[in-house]
Image (tube, rainbow, N blue to C red):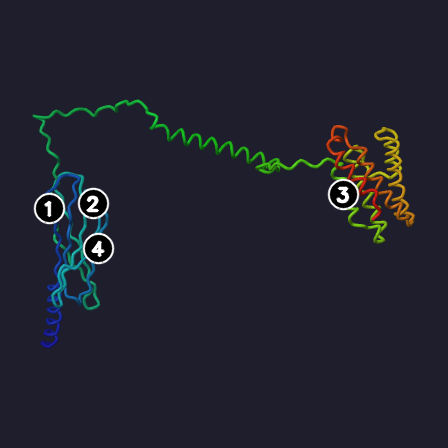
């Protein structure tokens, strides 16, 4: 029995000695300061290196009227063999005058697989207000705001932003209308289309260079030749020649008297020979194929609008006679 009591005493005494080796303290840089000022609160810990003790996590408000403004990381003040001295600093303030108390702060540590707690002593301090000497200074009411005239520099920013906002609104309306009408945002000017007679003469020159009938492509030659003339008639005289038969085209010219009788004869020769080739499958003589080409050139040149005839007659007539008359 005495042995058991002795062992229990030794264990308890060891725990007491271990706790005595850990010291904690809370202190302020100053115990008196003015309302709204800030003062540092230091938490100091001296402990063995082997002791598992951590600084507590404090709330933003330590007590009524005591607020933590800033928290600093713990640092080591001294290290002596197996003993460490640690410190953590908090910046606190108070906006309530009078006496205040920083309550005891708990520190938990692990001892023999059991969590134990140590407490700091309470810290007292006084918050003073700023003294006012009413004998020398008079307390006045709060002054009303002073009216100052506006300057251009004060409102220039609003003007600029107003212009930018107006520009954005106008741009948005413009984009919306273009999108609704399915139009491009920026219209790119197109090159004016060539006059119908220029297009027709260019295509006749290209067809002549292919030498289709000379290579036994008779039907293809007359088909392309009549297509050129039909498209020219549509563009020049607004007659739906691509959808009409050869006879309907001739009748349209007879009714309206758009062209001279000589032009009409040349047109009839072109269309009639082409119909024979495409539908009757005849094989025209080389002179007949060449005649259709010369009549096509003549038909286009003779039906050029009067106001433009003087510009192109000199250069086109010479090339027409040279090209149309040659049987290459």
Name above or below for residue 49 compared with residue 60. Answer: below
Name above or below for residue 214 compared with residue 307. Answer: below
Distance Cα–Cα, label 4 vs label 3: 90 Å
Q: Residues within 10 Å of mark 4 (few under 14, many from 20)?
A: few
Residue 67's label in the rendered image is 2
Q: In this view of the protein, can residue 242 be seen by the observer?
A: no
Indicate which disc, 1 or 4, sits on the residue closer to the N terminus. Answer: 1
Distance Cα–Cα, label 4 vs label 2: 18 Å
Cβ–Cβ under 8 Å for marks 3 and 2: no
Horizontal arrangement in the rendering, residue 161 relative to residue 40 (left or right): right
Outermost residue, left side: 135
Distance Cα–Cα, label 1 vs label 4: 21 Å
- Where's residue 309, x and y in %? 76, 31
Distance Cα–Cα, label 1 vs label 3: 105 Å
Residue that carries the numbered disc 3 in the rendered image: 203
Q: Quadrant of residue 323?
A: top right
Residue 243's label in the rendered image is none
Instruction: Check disc 1 and report its element: helix, strand or loop.
Output: loop
Indicate which disc, 3 or 2, sits on the residue closer to the N terminus. Answer: 2
Instruction: Check disc 2 and report its element: helix, strand or loop.
Output: strand
Residue 73's label in the rendered image is 4
């Amino acid at each position: 029995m005495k042995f058991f009591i002795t062992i229990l005493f030794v264990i308890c005494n060891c725990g007491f000695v271990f706790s005595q080796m850990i010291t904690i303290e809370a202190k302020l840089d100053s115990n008196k300061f003015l309302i709204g000022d800030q003062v540092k609160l230091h938490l100091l810990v001296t402990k063995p290196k082997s002791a598992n003790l951590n600084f507590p996590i404090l709330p933003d408000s330590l007590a009524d009227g005591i607020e933590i403004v800033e928290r600093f990381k713990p640092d080591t003040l001294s290290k002596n063999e197996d003993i460490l001295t640690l410190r953590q600093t908090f910046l606190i303030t108070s906006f309530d005058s009078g006496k205040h108390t920083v309550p005891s702060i708990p520190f938990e540590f692990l001892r023999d697989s059991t969590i134990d707690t140590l407490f700091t002593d309470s810290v007292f301090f006084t918050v003073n207000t700023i003294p006012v000497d009413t004998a020398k200074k008079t307390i006045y009411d709060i002054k009303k705001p002073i009216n100052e005239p506006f300057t251009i520099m004060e409102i220039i920013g609003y003007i600029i932003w107003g212009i930018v906002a107006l520009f954005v609104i106008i741009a948005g309306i413009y984009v919306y209308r273009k999108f609704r009408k399915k139009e491009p945002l920026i219209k790119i000017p197109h090159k004016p289309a060539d006059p119908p007679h220029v297009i027709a003469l260019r295509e006749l020159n290209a067809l002549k260079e292919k030498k289709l009938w000379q290579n036994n492509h008779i039907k293809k030659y007359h088909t392309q030749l009549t297509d050129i003339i039909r498209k020219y008639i549509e563009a020049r005289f607004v007659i739906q020649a691509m959808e009409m038969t050869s006879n309907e085209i001739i009748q349209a010219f007879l009714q309206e008297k758009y062209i001279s009788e000589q032009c009409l004869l040349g047109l009839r020769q072109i269309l009639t020979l082409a119909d024979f080739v495409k539908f009757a499958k005849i094989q025209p003589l080389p002179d007949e194929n060449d005649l259709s080409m010369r009549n096509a050139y003549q038909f286009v040149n003779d039906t050029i609008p009067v106001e433009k005839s003087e510009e192109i007659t000199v250069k086109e007539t010479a090339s027409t006679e040279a090209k149309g008359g040659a049987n290459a």
